[in-house]
Amino acid sequence: MFRKTRAERERELDQVLRGIADHPLSSEEVRQANSLIEQLDGQDPSVIDDALASRGLPSLQDLGRMQLKHGLAFGRLHRRRRKLEKTLGRT
């Protein structure tokens, strides 16, 4: 019915960005685990799990659970961010 003002969209984008930053899949330990997994690409999963455990990072199984539990919400936040950035001309 009513269009949102630019300021309202800016506030909404700020909220979405905070939601992404605070999301469990954006945590530092998940980022480190994903980086290590990329470095060990092609290795046996047990080798990757051992490397993760030695650094105190979540296991492959834990990362998979987190992805299943939080992945959909994380994707929605990113889609909303892209839509707002496009609307605001920030792409």
Image (cartoon, rainbow, N blue to C red):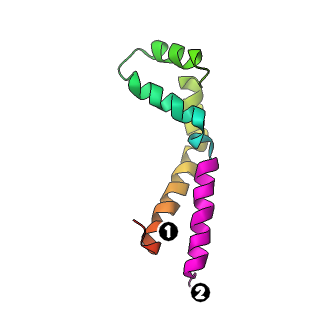
Is 14 placed above or below 33 here? below
Q: Position of residue 84 (x, y in %)?
A: 50, 68
24 magenta-colored: no
Q: Position of residue 44 (x, y in %)?
A: 41, 14
Residue name at image x 52 percent, y 62 percent: 80
Please name the residue shown 62% across and 70% down the image.
11
Q: The residue tagged with tag 2: helix, strand or loop?
A: loop
Per the image, the residue denoted by label 1 is: 84
Indicate the quadrant containing the N terminus: top left, top right, bottom left or bottom right: bottom right
Dot 1 lies on which element?
helix
- In percent of width and height, residue 4 lies at 58, 81
Residue type at tag 1 = Leu
Look at the picture and state if 77 lies above or below 64: below
- Name the residue: 47% across, 73% down: 88
Question: Mark 2 — residue?
Answer: 2
Q: Residues within 10 Å of mark 2 (few under 14, many from 20)?
A: few
**Counting other residues with Cα less than 10 Å from the Cα at mark 1, is it few (<14), some (14-19), or many (20 or more)?**
some
Residue found at the very far left of the displayed protein: 42
**Residue placed furthest toward the bottom:** 2
Separation of residues labelled 1 and 2 (CA atoms)? 17 Å
Question: Which label belongs to residue 18?
Answer: none
Residue drawn at (60%, 49%) of the image = 21
Segment colored magenta: 1-22
Mark closest to the chain's N terminus, 1 or 2: 2
